[in-house]
Image (cartoon, coloured by chain):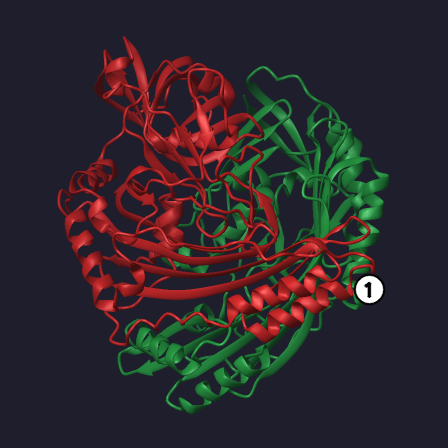
Chain colours: A green, B red
């Protein structure tokens, strides 16, 4: 059976179950092109599709929900029957699905990549080859997303993604790892320059040092230390008391941070017109001048709280500070990149390795009171200050 | 009411959180969706696809994989069984320009396989090709004690209920959450190339349990898992091991911060040793010998075992490594089972001398390359081979993984299979505990 046949079979099965309170079908079809240099050199393509159903059942005792993925050619009716039984047995508080949301207007597809993912890969490989890398792995992906819901909501959009990982010949073992929706945002030149510029620092004597993180270091991995705030905005953790602060409370003594979630950043990595089940994606504040404001609310969490859904925490936006780069860097230990990072979601405590040792501290406290630069830095997931002065931080 | 995923995540139990956290319902009345019968026309279609590739590619290979994963879990309130199947076909070969080319699809319908083969050769330059003489046909299906294909829903439920009942013994009211799980992969692979037409079925399982208790404002977990090339044999998880996780969750810790130890004797539990070994890979010199062994291991220990790699090359006698296909079909050079030759020391704590520290498990692994910054779940002090009762939870083990292994002074006699991956290429480290030397520091810094 083809994807179209599977889709039709699933929709027929869903529409036949009129007793379902609500359901959504998400069809994700992917085309991928890739090339490798060095070990396992070669080039390839791939196609795939995933069909995911979420359904809700209402009962006097509450509402139950179940999700399942439809394998190629699977018996949709049998899978649906099993999921209905699971939903019946997983009743929670009643809640009503919000009204269908209009898709946000956001660009998520690079037309050049969409038209020719193989060509995009070849161009990136040429750039890396010229940059004297020993290994490289480049991928371009075109994803078509279709969403259909019980209430006749139907939306479709295209997303592109390009990733590039490479190991440089010098300095030894220097690695770049970049991803973006658009080739122009991959910033290969910047990533290569940063990887080459990282000096091999001698270990620092243990102590407390005034630390400045560049945005690249702050965002190590993906959200980096800002993951502490993303975790605090999890409504399930908040409801169970596993967070440090709740909306309306200060995030910490002396905190001045303002942090906004924006799922409509053009070509943002987390940007999307709608959430996974058709809920709205909106821009909303997480923290305003040191006071917690909002949580990332999907359709269920929003309904239980009597609020509107916002699609969860996505791109992070922080207004620029008012200090010059030189003012911030003066007398500080400036860290351009981290080697590794662990952030504890419920406490915000972190530890991070860098060339000179290990940083340890309270990410929420340090970032909440940080002094930031007037200069800004942008990535597919972040718009904010280029430099963050954390004050004294423990190093060992 | 606690969300299981959140509680498991807060307690730092990664594997259980991913397995147990996704499930949720009371006893289902509907049957587990029956496993799809594999299309008998698939194998001929793979051979036909090889012939198509050979018209323009040298070294043609056709790979197919159907993996059925059954996840069953029971916790304080609920039980559930989830059954998912994923398919993958990868067609590959070398073009006349010398470039290795591949095309992957996620469907195994014969017509789609044929179309994918045509699509791949359409992108290859003219002038290539090979005369492929079909290689010998081989079918391998190692015997499995409990075959998941023969189990009905009730069987899965009974096994998990029995496991959960044993896990509940030895706890008290401070244990606020308890779960037991079994995950079984029933996987069939086909690799068709000039070297042969090989079909191989592998069954592997992870069976485990978790107990969580509150300590002040944070949840603390005790966890155990057995993994290997067997079906959902829940009896492999002994009652003693299940009782121990309650003790681990309930154990109190020593007030005050841990005092840094720049060069401590450490007893590494198998799970901790496995983390070092996975970083280092095969090693022939030094006190610890590590071999990558994809063969059948005794007592079903080979969670990552296979006979022919995903390019159709037999592993027997091979020294150059093997290629596996990840979830998306990308080729990766991945170890199968990193096996440490067991030693003769039955009780490692007795082999430690005046003062030592027992490192119970891994909470998080930091560090880069060979340098480790491993945060332990719990560290307990030993004096003259006996536990003193002192224990800490926020301790970090630091050092070079290679140097730690080179400094090993004793190797345990009882190896344990530690499964390394849950959703990608199956891999394992089979190792006993080790005694070595390492630096230990408080993971939250000096007080």
Location of residue A65 with respect to B214 vertically, above or below: below
**What chain is tagged by disc 1?**
A
Left-right relation of B331 to A163: left
Judged from this view, the residue extending furthest toward the top is B354
Q: Position of residue B195 (x, y in %)?
A: 58, 50
Q: Residue at x 73, y 56 (%)?
A: B57
* Residue A211 drawn at (x, y percent): 64, 29
Residue A108 visible at all:
no
Q: Position of residue A108 (x, y in %)?
A: 71, 66
| Residue at the extreme right of the image, as rendered | A130
Q: Residues within 10 Å of mark 1 (few under 14, many from 20)?
A: few
Quadrant of the image containing the C terminus of chain B: top left
Q: Residue at the location (30% across, 41% down)?
A: B220
Q: Is residue B262 above or below residue B312?
A: above
Q: Who is closer to the viewer here, B47 or A84?
A: B47
Foreground pick, A127 / A104: A127
- Is residue B95 positioned above or below B440 on the image? below
Identify the residue at image location x=27%, y=83%.
A60
Q: Is residue B76 left or right of residue B131?
A: left
Which sits in the foreground, A227 or A177? A177
Asked if A70 appears above or below B67 in the picture, the reply is below
Residue picked out by circle 1: A112
Q: The N terminus of chain B appears in which quarter of the rendering?
A: bottom left
Label 1: which secondary element: helix
Residue in the foreground of this view, choosing between B264 and B53: B53
Q: Can residue A235 be seen?
A: yes
- Where residue B428 sits: x, y (%)? 42, 40
Q: Residue at x 31, y 49 (%)?
A: B230
């Amino acid at each position: 059976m083809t994807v179209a046949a599977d889709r039709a079979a699933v929709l027929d099965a869903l529409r036949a179950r009129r007793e379902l309170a609500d359901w959504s079908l998400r069809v994700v079809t992917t085309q991928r092109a890739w090339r490798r240099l060095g070990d396992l050199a070669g080039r390839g393509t791939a196609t795939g599709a995933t069909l995911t159903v979420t359904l809700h059942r209402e009962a006097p005792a509450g509402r139950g929900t179940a999700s399942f993925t439809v394998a190629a050619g699977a018996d949709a009716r049998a899978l649906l029957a099993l999921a209905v039984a699971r939903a019946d047995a997983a009743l929670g508080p009643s809640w009503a699905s919000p009204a269908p949301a209009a898709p946000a207007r956001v660009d998520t597809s690079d037309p050049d990549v969409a038209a020719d993912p193989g060509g995009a890969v070849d161009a990136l490989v040429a750039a890396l080859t010229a940059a004297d890398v020993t290994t490289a792995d480049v991928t371009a992906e075109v994803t078509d997303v279709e969403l259909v819901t019980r209430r006749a909501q139907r939306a479709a959009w295209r997303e592109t993604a390009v990733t590039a990982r490479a190991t440089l010949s010098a300095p030894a073992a220097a690695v770049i790892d970049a991803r973006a929706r658009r080739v122009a945002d991959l910033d290969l030149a910047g990533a290569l320059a940063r990887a080459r510029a990282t000096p091999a620092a001698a270990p620092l004597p243990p102590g407390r040092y005034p630390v400045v993180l560049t945005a690249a270091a702050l965002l190590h991995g993906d959200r980096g230390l800002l993951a502490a705030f993303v975790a605090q905005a999890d409504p399930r953790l908040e409801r169970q008391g596993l967070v440090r602060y709740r909306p309306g409370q200060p995030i910490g003594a002396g905190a001045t941070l303002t942090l906004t979630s924006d799922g409509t950043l053009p070509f943002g990595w987390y940007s999307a017109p709608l959430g996974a089940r058709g809920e709205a994606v909106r821009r909303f504040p997480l923290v305003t001048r040191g006071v917690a404001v909002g949580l990332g609310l999907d359709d269920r969490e929003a309904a239980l709280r009597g609020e509107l859904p916002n699609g969860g925490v996505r791109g992070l936006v922080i207004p620029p500070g008012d200090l010059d780069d030189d003012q911030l860097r003066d007398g500080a230990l400036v860290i351009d990149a981290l080697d590794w990072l662990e952030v504890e979601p419920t406490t915000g405590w972190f530890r991070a390795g860098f060339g000179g040792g290990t940083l340890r501290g309270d990410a929420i406290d340090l970032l909440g009171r940080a002094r930031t630069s007037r200069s800004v830095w942008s990535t597919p997931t972040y718009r904010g200050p280029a430099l963050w002065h954390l004050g004294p931080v423990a190093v060992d | 009411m606690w969300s299981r995923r959140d509680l498991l995540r807060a307690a730092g139990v990664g594997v259980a959180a991913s397995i147990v956290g996704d499930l949720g319902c009371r006893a289902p009345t509907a049957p587990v969706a029956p496993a799809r019968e594999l299309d008998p026309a698939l194998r001929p279609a793979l051979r036909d696809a090889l012939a198509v590739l050979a018209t323009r590619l040298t070294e043609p290979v056709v790979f197919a994989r159907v993996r059925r994963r059954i996840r069953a879990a029971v916790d304080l309130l609920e039980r559930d069984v989830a059954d998912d199947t994923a398919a993958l076909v990868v067609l590959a070969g070398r073009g006349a320009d010398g470039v290795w080319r591949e095309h992957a699809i996620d469907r195994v319908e014969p017509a789609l396989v044929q179309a994918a083969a045509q699509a791949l050769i359409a992108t290859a330059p003219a002038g290539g090709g090979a005369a492929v003489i079909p290689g010998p046909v081989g079918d391998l299906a190692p015997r499995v004690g409990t075959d998941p294909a023969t189990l009905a829903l009730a069987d899965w439920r009974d096994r998990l209920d029995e496991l959960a009942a044993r896990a509940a013994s030895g706890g008290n009211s401070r244990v606020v959450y308890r779960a037991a799980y079994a995950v079984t992969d029933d996987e069939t692979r086909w690799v068709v190339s000039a070297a042969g037409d090989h079909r191989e079925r592998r069954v592997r399982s992870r069976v485990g349990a978790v107990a969580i208790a509150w300590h002040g404002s944070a949840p603390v977990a005790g966890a155990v898992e057995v993994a290997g090339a067997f079906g959902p044999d829940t009896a492999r998880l002994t009652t003693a091991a299940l009782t121990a996780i309650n003790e681990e969750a309930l154990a109190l810790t020593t007030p005050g911060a841990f005092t840094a130890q720049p060069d401590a004797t450490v007893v590494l539990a198998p799970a901790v040793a496995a983390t070092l070994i996975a970083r280092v890979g095969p090693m022939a010199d030094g006190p610890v010998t590590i071999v990558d062994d994809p063969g059948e291991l005794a007592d079903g220990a080979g969670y990552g075992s296979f006979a022919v790699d995903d390019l159709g090359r037999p592993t027997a006698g091979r020294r150059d490594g093997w290629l596996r296909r990840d979830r998306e079909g990308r080729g990766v050079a991945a170890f199968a089972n990193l096996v440490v030759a067991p030693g003769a020391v039955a009780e490692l704590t007795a082999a430690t001398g005046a003062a030592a520290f027992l490192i119970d498990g891994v909470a998080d692994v930091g560090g880069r390359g060979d340098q480790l910054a491993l945060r332990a779940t719990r560290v307990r002090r030993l004096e003259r081979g006996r536990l003193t009762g002192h224990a800490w939870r926020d301790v970090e083990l630091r050092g070079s993984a290679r140097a730690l292994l080179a400094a090993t002074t004793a190797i345990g006699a009882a190896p344990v299979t530690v499964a390394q991956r849950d959703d990608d290429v199956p891999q394992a480290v089979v190792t006993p505990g080790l005694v070595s030397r390492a630096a230990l520091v408080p993971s939250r810094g000096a007080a």
